[in-house]
Image: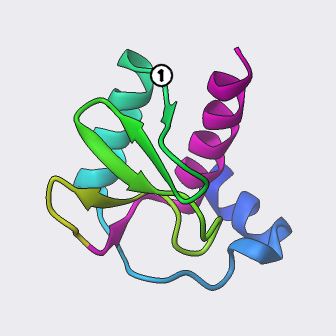
Protein backbone atom coordinates (compact mmCIF):
# COMPACT_ATOMS: atom_id res chain seq x y z
CA UNK A 1 0.00 0.00 0.00
CA UNK A 2 2.88 2.36 0.82
CA UNK A 3 4.28 1.86 -2.70
CA UNK A 4 0.90 2.68 -4.23
CA UNK A 5 0.56 5.99 -2.38
CA UNK A 6 4.20 6.86 -3.02
CA UNK A 7 3.62 6.55 -6.76
CA UNK A 8 0.41 8.59 -6.70
CA UNK A 9 1.96 11.50 -4.83
CA UNK A 10 5.23 11.59 -6.82
CA UNK A 11 4.36 12.35 -10.46
CA UNK A 12 7.99 12.13 -11.56
CA UNK A 13 7.72 8.37 -10.94
CA UNK A 14 4.60 7.85 -13.07
CA UNK A 15 6.34 7.06 -16.36
CA UNK A 16 9.17 4.56 -16.23
CA UNK A 17 11.48 2.98 -18.80
CA UNK A 18 12.03 -0.76 -18.86
CA UNK A 19 10.10 -3.59 -17.26
CA UNK A 20 9.77 -4.10 -13.53
CA UNK A 21 11.64 -7.13 -12.19
CA UNK A 22 10.71 -8.55 -8.81
CA UNK A 23 13.96 -10.52 -8.74
CA UNK A 24 16.11 -7.44 -9.40
CA UNK A 25 14.12 -5.47 -6.82
CA UNK A 26 14.88 -8.06 -4.12
CA UNK A 27 18.53 -8.33 -5.17
CA UNK A 28 19.00 -4.56 -5.14
CA UNK A 29 17.53 -4.32 -1.64
CA UNK A 30 19.93 -7.02 -0.42
CA UNK A 31 22.88 -5.30 -2.12
CA UNK A 32 21.96 -1.98 -0.49
CA UNK A 33 21.95 -3.61 2.96
CA UNK A 34 25.33 -5.25 2.45
CA UNK A 35 27.26 -2.65 0.41
CA UNK A 36 27.87 1.04 -0.10
CA UNK A 37 27.50 2.83 -3.42
CA UNK A 38 30.81 3.83 -5.03
CA UNK A 39 30.77 6.63 -7.57
CA UNK A 40 32.30 5.83 -10.95
CA UNK A 41 31.18 8.98 -12.80
CA UNK A 42 28.05 11.14 -13.09
CA UNK A 43 26.22 8.41 -15.01
CA UNK A 44 27.29 5.22 -13.27
CA UNK A 45 27.82 3.84 -9.79
CA UNK A 46 29.06 0.56 -8.38
CA UNK A 47 27.15 -1.51 -5.84
CA UNK A 48 28.61 -4.89 -4.94
CA UNK A 49 29.57 -6.64 -8.17
CA UNK A 50 27.23 -4.55 -10.31
CA UNK A 51 27.66 -1.31 -12.20
CA UNK A 52 24.37 0.57 -12.31
CA UNK A 53 23.06 3.34 -14.51
CA UNK A 54 21.98 6.28 -12.33
CA UNK A 55 21.88 9.28 -14.66
CA UNK A 56 18.25 8.99 -15.70
CA UNK A 57 16.71 9.27 -12.25
CA UNK A 58 13.97 8.29 -11.66
CA UNK A 59 12.59 6.85 -14.90
CA UNK A 60 15.56 4.64 -15.90
CA UNK A 61 17.83 4.64 -12.85
CA UNK A 62 19.34 1.61 -11.14
CA UNK A 63 19.34 -0.61 -14.17
CA UNK A 64 22.24 -3.03 -14.56
CA UNK A 65 24.87 -2.09 -17.15
CA UNK A 66 27.65 -4.45 -16.05
CA UNK A 67 28.61 -7.32 -15.95
CA UNK A 68 25.86 -7.65 -18.60
CA UNK A 69 23.47 -4.87 -19.61
CA UNK A 70 19.93 -5.83 -18.60
CA UNK A 71 17.03 -3.47 -19.18
CA UNK A 72 15.01 -4.20 -16.07
CA UNK A 73 14.23 -1.96 -13.13
CA UNK A 74 13.26 -2.30 -9.46
CA UNK A 75 10.07 -0.91 -7.88
CA UNK A 76 9.55 2.82 -8.03
CA UNK A 77 9.87 3.06 -4.25
CA UNK A 78 13.09 1.03 -4.31
CA UNK A 79 14.48 3.45 -6.90
CA UNK A 80 13.68 6.29 -4.51
CA UNK A 81 15.31 4.49 -1.56
CA UNK A 82 18.37 3.56 -3.63
CA UNK A 83 18.84 7.17 -4.72
CA UNK A 84 18.62 8.39 -1.12
CA UNK A 85 21.16 5.79 0.01
CA UNK A 86 23.44 6.56 -2.92
CA UNK A 87 23.54 10.28 -2.04
CA UNK A 88 24.16 9.45 1.63
CA UNK A 89 26.97 7.03 0.74
CA UNK A 90 28.63 9.60 -1.52
CA UNK A 91 28.57 12.21 1.24
CA UNK A 92 30.05 9.97 3.95
Q: Residue 10: give x, y in percent of width and height.
A: 81, 67
Q: Main secondary structure of the magenta part?
A: helix
Q: Which residue in the protein does label 1 denote?
A: 36
Determine whether 25 is above or below 7 in the image: above
* Residue in the foreground of this view, choosing between 48 and 80: 48
Residue 72 placement, left or right of 23: right
Q: Residue at x 29, y 75 (%)?
A: 71
Q: Residue 29: give x, y in percent of width and height.
A: 40, 35
Q: What is the span of residues highlighted in magenta in the rendered image?
A: 71-92
Q: Give the position of the C terminus as an image quadrant.
A: top right
Q: Is residue 81 magenta?
A: yes
Q: Give the position of the N terminus as an image quadrant.
A: bottom right
Residue 63 placement, left or right of 87: left
Determine whether 67 is above or below 32 in the image: below
Q: Quadrant of residue 48?
A: top left
Determine whether 7 is above or below 74 in the image: below
Q: Residue 22: give x, y in percent of width and height.
A: 29, 57
Disc 1 crowd, CA 10 A, few/some/many (<14, 14-19, 20+): some
Q: Residue at x 81, y 77 (%)?
A: 11
Amino acid sequence: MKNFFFTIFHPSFWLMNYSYSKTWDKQLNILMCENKFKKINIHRTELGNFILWTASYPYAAFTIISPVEINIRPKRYTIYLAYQKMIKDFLT
